[in-house]
Amino acid sequence: MGDWSLPEKLLKIEEGLRGIAASGNVPSRNELRSWYFELLDAARECKDTIPGGFDNIEDLSDACNQLREAAFAVDDITEALHNNSKSVSERMNILRNVDKRLDEIENAVIKATGRPCRWSRELGDSRLRHTLLINDIAACVHVLAQYMLEKGPDRVEGKCSIAKDADQEAIE
């Protein structure tokens, strides 16, 4: 019996990113890099292991690809926070590009789940703070994980997806 663990992995990533955002401190380069790699790993796993049973498998696959973009957004935030050779203007441009990337990520999440995930959109330029951008990344990861938990299989065995409401006799 195998469990489909991707949603739980995404919730762990969400928790870590929200912790960074909530602290209000500038996270270390190493801390951000570790979440960058976690997101890349989740994107790979998501793309390779989406089980059957989802009505919108193509949209969900696109949302999984956007997890890579979320990783790149974290990497760009790292660059903006820690590359001292960049001017303030260059750093702000990096954060503006992260904001644009987050719009694309949210569009894919909405298409796959029907739910928005960015909450700082209404804040004008103040949304370009690293804490709000990281929180928006975490929120998009959360919406995707929740959708997978709600609509996904109970478990995956080999190439078979076992639905939550599956007839137990049919499984055996």
Image (cartoon, helix red, strand yellow):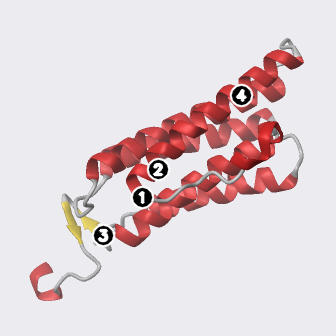
Q: Nearer the viewer, residue 155 or 150?
A: 150
- N-term mark: 2 or 4: 4
Instruction: Confirm or deny contact between disc 1 and disc 2 (CB under 8 A).
Output: yes
Secondary element under disc 1, as helix, strand or loop, is helix
Question: Looking at the rendering, in which quadrant would you find the N terminus?
Answer: bottom left
Q: Which residue is mark 1?
A: 113
Alpha-carbon span between mark 3 and mark 4: 37 Å
Secondary element under disc 3, as helix, strand or loop, is loop
In the rendered view, does 170 fall on the left or right side of 45?
left
Type of amino acid under label 2: Val
Vertical side of 170 occupied by 37: above or below: above
Residue at point 64%, 52% (across, down): 138
Alpha-carbon span between mark 2 and mark 3: 19 Å
Secondary element under disc 2, as helix, strand or loop, is helix
Q: Measuring from the top left, give residue 158's x and y in whole percent.
A: 21, 60
- N-term mark: 4 or 1: 4
Q: Which residue is mark 2?
A: 109
Labels 2, 3: front one: 2
Instruction: Confirm or deny contact between disc 2 and disc 4 (CB under 8 A).
Output: no
Residue at point 31%, 45% (across, down): 48
Q: Which residue is mark 4?
A: 96
Residue 3 in sight: yes
- N-term mark: 2 or 3: 2
Q: Which residue is mark 3?
A: 153
Type of amino acid under label 4: Arg
